[in-house]
């Protein structure tokens, strides 16, 4: 048996991870992670054969993860299958538009999932084999083509002894100057070949004109000038490296606009052409020509300085003069009898490497706020004073609005929120963390009451702005807060804890409580709230209310749960029982986030261990877990629920957070405890 293919599953629902692993582990090596960030950490070290990617996840959603995968040259070829409970045509269409290989709906059907994964991996294997063969043939063609056009360039240079080797020298001089000004090695390799072919248009100029020892007539000079346009025409369809025709066409333009063929001026002249223009003139001055002997080195330097700012780019002249003074210009040029350079085709292809910009820049291009990196620097410096408060601010329902009205509308909303935060910030620090998430830092705050005043000011200002701007109507803010000294002392620790508090705010089904301190009040439900949640869900599913109606609950994540139940009920004709497990405080006291997280993990583990193979489940809120039992008898329901409760207390150990549950039939609601 061969080596198993590796599948990376990215899903924030632990139940889904465990269920998928059970289906796939016999045939594949399965790696499960619960967030987009964890997925990227894994991809930094390993390369899976397939990615199963959930769409709706906190922090980084599936579509954003997919976008980043597509932008990375090492990850963009990994086949991706989206996982979601959303079966809308628009969602499926968007998945394929973003480059997904397939689309699998939740709850998973083992047979369908396995068949689609097998097909995706098999097709990807065929694609890789075809791509490998194509690349081999392409490299062969590239090498032959480059050798052919280089031979043409050398043939042109060899029309007379005075210009022999000119194009090769210009290519190496250009390479040296490009490296001097900080170009990447890939860019340096490209300009070598661009410069090598810069005079290819001279193939259309008569030898008698090229070799004429006397002054050219106006007609003859026009023929000489035309070699730039002719060269560009010859090279225009060659796509092996960028700007090859640009170098041929514009290397005789002048910085003052008096050159040819187009009279371009200053920065209008492409940089590759400005580089070739200087080194082309240098080689002409340092070579014997039919009408004169080579110039002395000192005279060459004087001519270059005389042309600074008129014929040549001043900055490039300075850099080239340093190359001459360092004596490094000619060290890599081959002997004159080497008319055919050796090509390494592996170095020709591939996009030009560029640094990541945007949120890591000093200022975010869209909002005008500080970028993430600069924000971290300034907040870290401010934290040295010993007091401060960090707020993670997220826009609720932003994705839905973005999909409905387009990205231009989304950018407008982000800009409005950024402007509002700047207005209320005064001397505080505000930065954009990514997507629809902002970080707000208040210096000098040491008490929760002081921070709460600032939070309320932000929320009140936002509500006021919503009344003025219709586009903000369906948007709300969620805020997670951490305090210096109470929740940590470093930027990273405070951001992580504020982010955890933010996650719990978004998980909580409470439109009134839009913020939470990391060491804040309990997120646990009361028993009355739990029963109301289940009644609402059952009523919506039985009445087949629309997806839009589900979001009127003002709880963003509820839409995912609603779709999950609705689609499962549509797929099965058997009777379905919904059980909503809820954690709550035994004595009515507050439960801190860390306590609730540990209790939720224990409850999820208890549920995973106790469910039958046909049962499914998903997290419902920060303190609740929803289980669907298919075709279960009353005795089965009792056995399953009691087993879950027993396993929970065995895993959790303490009795400060207890467990209750409500049961509902999709056709008849029933309370149980």
Image: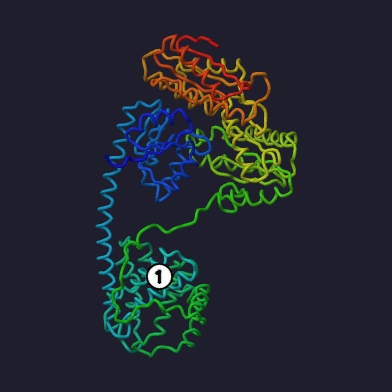
Please tell me in which quadrant of the rendered image residue 501 appears.
top right
**Taking 166 as reference, is 507 above or below it?**
above
- Pinpoint residue 255: horizontal percent, then vertical percent: 48, 73
Q: Residue at x 49, y 21 (%)?
A: 626
Residue 90 in percent (x, y) is at 41, 32
Number of numbered discs overlaid on the protein picture: 1
Q: Is residue 208 left or right of residue 332?
A: left
Q: How is the image coloured?
A: rainbow
Structural crowding at the residue carrying mark 1, measured as other residues with C-alpha within 10 Å and reported as few (<14), some (14–19) or many (≥20):
many
Question: With respect to residue 670, does 41 lie above or below?
Answer: below
Q: What residue lies at 67% left-to-right and 19% top-to-bottom? A: 588
Q: Quadrant of the C terminus?
A: top right
Q: Nearer the viewer, residue 195 or 123?
A: 123
| Lateral position of residue 362 relative to residue 79, left or right | right
Report the front residue among 47 and 440. Answer: 47
User: What x and y, as percent, mark residue 207?
Assistant: 26, 82
Residue 308, image x, y percentages: 52, 78
From the viewer's side, name the closer residue of 47 and 536.
47
In this rendering, the answer to whether 113 lies above or below 420 is above
| Quarter of the figure with residue 475 | top right
Helix, strand or loop at label 1? It is helix
Q: Left or right of 136: which side holds 294?
A: right
For mark 1, what is the residue? 250
Vertical side of 113 occupied by 210: above or below: below
Q: Quadrant of the N terminus?
A: top left
């Amino acid at each position: 048996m061969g080596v198993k293919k590796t599948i990376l599953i990215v899903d924030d629902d632990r139940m889904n991870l465990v269920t998928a692993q059970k289906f796939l582990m016999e045939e594949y090596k399965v790696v499960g992670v619960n967030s987009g960030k964890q997925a990227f950490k894994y991809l930094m070290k390993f390369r899976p054969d397939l990615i199963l990617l959930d769409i709706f996840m906190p922090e980084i959603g599936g579509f954003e993860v997919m976008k980043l995968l597509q932008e990375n040259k090492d990850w963009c070829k990994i086949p991706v299958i989206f996982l979601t409970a959303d079966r809308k045509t628009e969602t499926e269409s968007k998945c394929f538009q973003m480059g997904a290989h397939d689309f699998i709906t939740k709850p998973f059907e083992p047979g369908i999932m396995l068949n689609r994964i097998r097909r995706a991996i098999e097709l990807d294997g065929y694609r890789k084999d075809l791509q490998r063969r194509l690349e081999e043939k392409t490299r062969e063609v590239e090498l032959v083509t480059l050798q052919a056009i280089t031979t043409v360039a050398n043939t042109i240079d060899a029309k007379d002894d005075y210009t022999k080797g000119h194009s090769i020298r210009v290519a190496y001089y250009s390479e040296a100057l490009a490296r001097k000004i900080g170009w990447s090695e890939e860019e340096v390799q490209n300009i070598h070949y661009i410069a090598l072919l810069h005079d290819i248009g001279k193939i259309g100029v008569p030898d008698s004109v090229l070799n004429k020892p006397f002054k050219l007539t106006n007609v003859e000079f026009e023929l000489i000038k035309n070699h730039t346009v002719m060269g560009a025409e010859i090279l225009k369809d060659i796509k092996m490296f960028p700007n090859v025709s640009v170098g041929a066409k514009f290397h005789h333009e002048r910085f003052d606009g008096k050159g040819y063929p187009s009279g371009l001026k200053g920065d209008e002249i492409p940089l590759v052409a400005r580089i070739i223009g200087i080194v082309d003139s240098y080689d002409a001055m340092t070579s014997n020509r039919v009408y004169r002997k080579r110039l002395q080195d000192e005279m060459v330097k004087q001519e270059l300085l005389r042309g600074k700012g008129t014929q040549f780019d001043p900055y490039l002249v300075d850099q080239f003069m340093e190359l001459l003074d360092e004596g490094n210009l000619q060290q890599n040029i081959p002997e004159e009898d080497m008319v055919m350079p050796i090509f390494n085709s592996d170095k020709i292809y591939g996009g030009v490497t560029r640094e990541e910009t945007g949120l890591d820049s000093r200022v975010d291009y869209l909002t005008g706020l500080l970028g993430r990196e600069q924000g971290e620097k300034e907040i870290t410096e401010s934290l040295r004073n010993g007091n401060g408060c960090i707020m993670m601010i997220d826009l609720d329902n932003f994705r839905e609005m973005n999909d409905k009205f387009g990205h231009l509308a989304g950018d407008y909303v982000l800009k409005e929120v950024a402007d509002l935060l700047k207005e209320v910030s005064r001397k505080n620090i505000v930065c954009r963390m990514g997507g629809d998430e902002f970080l707000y830092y208040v210096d000098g705050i040491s008490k929760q009451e002081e921070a709460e005043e600032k939070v309320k000011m932000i929320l009140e200002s936002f509500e006021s702005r919503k009344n003025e701007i219709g586009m903000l109507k369906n948007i709300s803010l969620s805020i997670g807060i951490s305090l210096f000294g109470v929740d940590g002392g470093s930027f990273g620790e405070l951001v992580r804890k504020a982010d955890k508090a933010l996650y719990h705010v978004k998980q909580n089904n409470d439109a009134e409580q839009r913020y939470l301190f990391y060491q804040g009040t309990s997120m646990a439900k009361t028993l009355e709230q739990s029963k109301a949640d289940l009644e609402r869900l059952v009523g919506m599913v039985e009445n087949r209310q629309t997806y839009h109606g589900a979001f009127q609950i003002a709880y963003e994540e509820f839409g995912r749960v609603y779709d999950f139940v609705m689609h499962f009920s549509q797929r099965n004709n058997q009777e379905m029982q919904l059980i909503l497990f809820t954690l709550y405080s035994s004595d009515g006291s507050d439960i801190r986030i860390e306590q609730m997280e540990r209790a939720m993990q224990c409850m999820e583990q208890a549920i995973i261990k106790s469910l039958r193979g046909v049962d499914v489940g998903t997290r419902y809120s920060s303190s609740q877990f929803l289980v669907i039992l298919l075709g279960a008898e009353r005795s089965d329901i009792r056995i399953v629920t009691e087993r879950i409760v027993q396993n929970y207390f065995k895993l959790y150990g303490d009795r400060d957070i207890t467990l209750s549950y409500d049961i509902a039939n999709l056709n008849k609601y029933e309370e149980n405890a």
